[in-house]
Image (cartoon, rainbow, N blue to C red):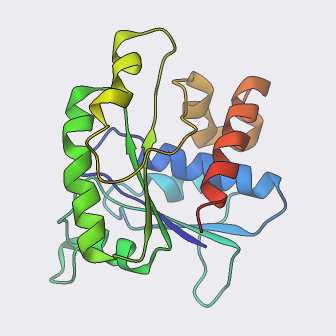
C-alpha cells in the first residue's frame, strides 16, 4: 500500500505522522519505508537516520510505502522544471492522508487539498486526519463541525498533541509512552484498513 501525506501548508504534521506510521507498521512486523519528497528540508530522512528507520530503496517492495511531501501543492522537485511533487505523490498513492490541526488556518486549506487529490487521482482513498487535538478544548471540540462540509471523510481516529510524538522524530518507537503507543496503533489500524 502506498500512502501519501499532503497538505497545502506547513505545520499540519505530515512528517510527524509519516514517522509515527513508519514506527507503528514496523511494530506489526510489516515491511515499511519512507520516500521523502520534501528534498529541501528532508526532515523524514533525517529522522529515519537517527533511529535506524527505513528509507525507500529503488526496486525494493514494501508492505507500506509512506510518501512525505513538501508544504505546498505546487512546489517543484529540487527547483527543476518537473511535475509538482505533491501531484506525483498523489498520482502514485492508493491512500492519501490530509493532516489538519484544529487551527482554523489549517482547516481552511483542507478542502482545497481534498479537491487537488480528487482531480489528480480519482481512484485514491482520501481521508482528512485530525492531528494535534486536545480533549476538552474549544478548537478540538468544534473541528468536526467545521469539517462537515469537506468532500472527504475524516478518519475516525485522531492523534492527540503529545510531546513524545515529536520525540519520536529522533527516538522512534522507544520515545513513545504507553498511552501514545496505544493511540498510534489504533490510528495505524484505521489507516491500514483503507483499501
The spot of residue 43 in percent (x, y) is: 45, 52
Is 176 above or below relative to 172? above
In this view of the protein, can residue 3 be seen by the observer? yes
Q: Depth check: give the residue in front, 63 or 55.
A: 63
Q: Quadrant of residue 130?
A: top left
User: Residue lying furthest right in this view?
Assistant: 29
Q: Depth check: give the residue in front, 57 or 133.
A: 133
Q: Residue at x 46, y 34 (%)?
A: 131
Q: Depth check: give the residue in front, 91 or 111.
A: 111
Quadrant in which the C terminus is drawn: bottom right
Q: Residue at x 79, y 66 (%)?
A: 30
The spot of residue 2 in percent (x, y) is: 55, 72
Is 113 above or below relative to 122? above
Q: Quadrant of residue 154?
A: top left
Q: Depth check: give the residue in front, 86 or 49.
A: 86
Quadrant in which the N terminus is drawn: bottom right
The spot of residue 98 in percent (x, y) is: 38, 51
Give left or right: position of 134 versus 80. right
Q: Residue at x 48, y 8 (%)?
A: 136
The spot of residue 147 in percent (x, y) is: 31, 37
Q: Quadrant of residue 61?
A: bottom right
Is 189 above or below relative to 117? above
Amino acid at each position: 500500500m502506498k500512502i501519501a501525506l499532503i497538505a497545502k501548508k506547513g505545520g499540519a504534521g505530515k512528517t510527524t505522522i509519516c514517522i509515527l506510521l513508519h514506527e507503528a507498521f514496523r511494530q506489526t512486523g510489516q515491511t515499511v519505508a519512507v520516500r521523502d519528497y520534501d528534498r529541501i528540508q528532508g526532515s523524514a530522512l533525517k529522522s529515519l537516520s537517527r533511529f535506524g528507520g527505513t528509507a525507500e530503496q529503488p526496486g525494493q517492495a514494501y508492505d507500506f510505502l509512506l510518501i512525505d511531501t513538501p508544504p505546498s501543492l505546487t512546489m517543484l522537485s529540487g527547483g527543476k522544471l518537473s511535475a509538482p511533487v505533491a501531484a506525483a505523490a498523489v498520482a502514485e498513492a492508493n491512500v492519501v492522508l490530509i493532516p489538519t490541526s484544529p487551527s482554523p488556518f489549517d482547516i481552511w486549506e483542507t478542502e482545497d487539498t481534498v479537491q487537488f487529490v480528487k482531480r489528480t487521482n480519482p481512484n485514491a482513498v482520501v481521508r482528512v486526519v485530525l492531528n494535534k487535538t486536545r480533549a476538552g478544548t474549544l478548537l478540538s471540540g468544534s473541528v468536526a463541525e467545521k469539517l462537515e462540509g469537506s468532500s472527504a471523510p475524516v478518519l475516525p481516529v485522531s492523534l492527540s498533541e503529545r510531546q513524545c510524538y515529536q520525540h519520536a522524530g529522533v527516538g522512534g518507537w522507544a520515545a513513545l509512552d504507553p498511552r501514545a503507543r496505544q493511540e498510534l496503533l489504533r490510528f495505524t489500524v484505521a489507516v491500514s484498513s483503507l483499501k
